[in-house]
Amino acid sequence: MPEIPWPDPWLRDGAILLRPWTRDDLPAIVAACQDPAVSRFSPHIPYPYGPADGLGWLESREPVRLSGEGIGFAIVDARSDELLGAIGVAGIDRLLGIARIGYWLAAQARGRGYATTALRLVAGWAFDGLGFARLELTTDPENVRSQRVAERCGFRREGHLRSHMLIRHSGERRDSLIYGLLPGELT
């Protein structure tokens, strides 16, 4: 697969900027991922989360982009560069034109519309800049905030996937709700 190009210009609005990850983000990543809600609702994030976890994850970002398998962005405050969260495109099937979007926010960034704004920016770019025909996201049935973010952006709930996610740190299997978005539906 060809590499995924970075958007030019960077994805931004008045409050947030979506940029590549750097090693300088490591302390903020580790701090944010200490929140049990992040690992509970993001099945690939271990708990507890330490510097080695963060460094391994950071070092995997560019090879994933270069391989065409996905691309991840740091969600940061556009003025201060404070890390607010993460958003990325993964699970890419170029033949079908489908990709998945996932996101998380640090506890202090929740409830301010940052996830909604980031999702709108990435979804618009995925359709217009990368040419995807469908975007999907899954969320835990108990993660009502994430469901509301998806719905505010025009994603439609399409189903309930039983025993869909394996939570890395607990070994527990959890259900997921799946949402889909087609070009022209982004709000």
Image (spheres, helix red, strand yellow):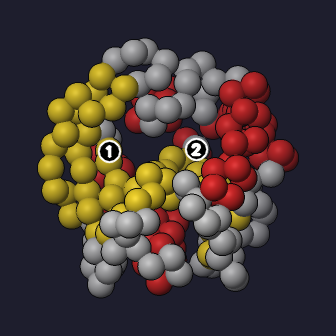
Disc 2 packing (10 Å; few <14; some 14–19; many ≥20): many
Disc on res. 106: 2
The correct choice, above or below, for 36 with respect to 135 in the image is: above
The correct choice, above or below, for 169 with respect to 37 in the image is: above
* Label 2: element kind: loop
Image quadrant in which the N terminus is located? bottom right
Left/right of residue 28 with respect to residue 146 in the rendered view: right
The correct choice, above or below, for 107 with respect to 183 in the image is: above
Disc 1 packing (10 Å; few <14; some 14–19; many ≥20): many
Amino acid type for the residue under numbered disc 1? Thr
* Label 1: element kind: strand
**Residue 137 in the image, given as x and y percentages of width and height:** 34, 54
User: Visible in this render: residue 53?
Assistant: yes
Left/right of residue 70 with respect to residue 171 in the rendered view: right
Q: Single out the residue that lies furthest toward the right.
A: 24
Disc on res. 139: 1
Left/right of residue 98 with respect to residue 70 in the rendered view: left
Image quadrant in which the C terminus is located? bottom left
- Most foreground residue, 104 or 164: 164
Amino acid type for the residue under numbered disc 2? Ala
